[in-house]
Each structure stands twice: as structure tokens, then as C-alpha cells.
Image (cartoon, rainbow, N blue to C red):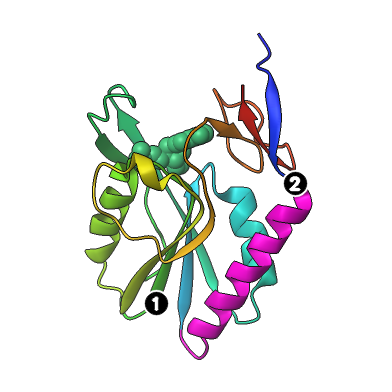
Amino acid sequence: MAEKLKLLFSKKEIAEAVTRLAGEISADYKGKRVVLIGILKGAFVFLADLARQMTIPAEIDFMRIASYGSRRESSGEVTVKKDVEVTLEGSDVLIVEDIVDTGLSLRFLIDHLRSHNPSSLRVCALVDKKSRREVDVHVDYTGFVIDEGFIVGYGIDFNEQYRALPEIFVIV
Ligand code: IMP
Ligand code: MG
């Protein structure tokens, strides 16, 4: 059954946010060995656009994690499905996430990546659902803050659907 979608962020709004983030990141990481770690699958489109808007070179890798238990209850048991492959020791690592919601996934990712001894570790999220936070995690670079709603498009899915939509929609 097809969901009803309402446009939330247009191509232009997304492009502006990505350009702004890429500018901030390029300035902050100038002269450093930056490694962007995209969190699959949701961040694949965002990472591709972000990396191409950056004016400094970056290494790129991916991680994929899986959460078990009901997301609503946030029982939050997380496991690694695909780990990073590049060396992070001594590098400046930036996690690139689609959405930070309860923060449980990000908490796990931060703890996991810290164990690889990067020089620094920061977070860039396209969308921050700040008011839904259950664990204290800091997002350094934020595209959009939203209060409620389930969103899809621009890499983000509902049951593996809608990832290829070029804009971001909210399911109504
Ligand atoms: P957290 O662990 O609760 O912060 O969950 C973050 C992850 O849940 C995101 O990376 C998404 O994969 C997924 N998620 C949270 N909100 C949405 C949404 O509105 N649409 C699609 N996926 C979502
Ligand atoms: Mg995700």
C-alpha cells in the first residue's frame, strides 16, 4: 500500500543545507586528514552530495549497523553489520548520518569508532530530531532540525521504499 507523502524539504533547500555544511566542514578540517564515514544505507545520497561540495580532500568509508527490538521502545541493542575498512588511527573522523532520533545508534557508533583511536571524532547529520533524544549525543553539523514526523527520500526509507526520491517528504 502506498503511503501519502507531503513535501518537506525541496531539492533547493537540501542543496543549500548541503552547501552550507560542506563549507563549514571544509573550513574546520583544512589541512587535516579527514575520513567521512557514511552510515548505510540512509546516508548514501547525503554523503555523495556532501563530499562533492567539500573543497578539501577526504577519504570515504561506510559502516552499517542494525538495531534490534522495537524502535519505539528504543530497547536499542545495536550490532555492527559492516565495519570500517580504512585506518582511523590518527585521522579526523566525521560520522555522516541521515537522521539522529533517540540517539541510540549514534551513541553506539561514537563508542565503536572511538575504539579505533581517531585524532578527533565529530558528527554531521542531515536531520536532527532533537526533541526525541533519549541519550545525550552531540551533533556538530546539522542540516535540518525537525520536531516530529517520519520522513523519507534523499536516501531515507520506509520499509526500503522511497530512498531514490530526490526530495524529502513526510509520511502523512
Ligand atoms: P536513533 O538510534 O533512534 O537515533 O535512530 C536513528 C536511525 O533511525 C536513523 O539513522 C534512521 O535510520 C532511522 N530513522 C529515525 N527516524 C526516521 C525517519 O523519520 N525516517 C526514516 N528513518 C528514520
Ligand atoms: Mg540510519
User: Which one is earlier in the sequence, the residue at label 1 or at label 2?
Assistant: 2
Q: Where residue 116 sits: x, y (%)?
A: 26, 67
Quarter of the picture holding the C terminus: top right
Question: Where does label 1 land, which residue?
Answer: 92
Asked which secondary structure carries label 2, the reply is loop
**Looking at the image, which residue sits at the far bottom?**
31
Q: Are marks 1 and 2 in contact (CB under 8 Å)?
A: no
19 vs 121, left or right, is right
Residue type, mark 2 in image? Ser
Q: Nearer the viewer, mark 1 or mark 2?
A: 2
**How many numbered discs?**
2
146 vs 108, left or right, is right
- Nearer to the camera, 47 or 75: 75
Asked which secondary structure carries label 1, the reply is strand
Residue 137: image tag: none
The vertical placement of 101 against 68, above or below, is: below
The magenta segment is 10-32
In magenta stretch: residue 15: yes
Residue drawn 65% across and 8% down? 1
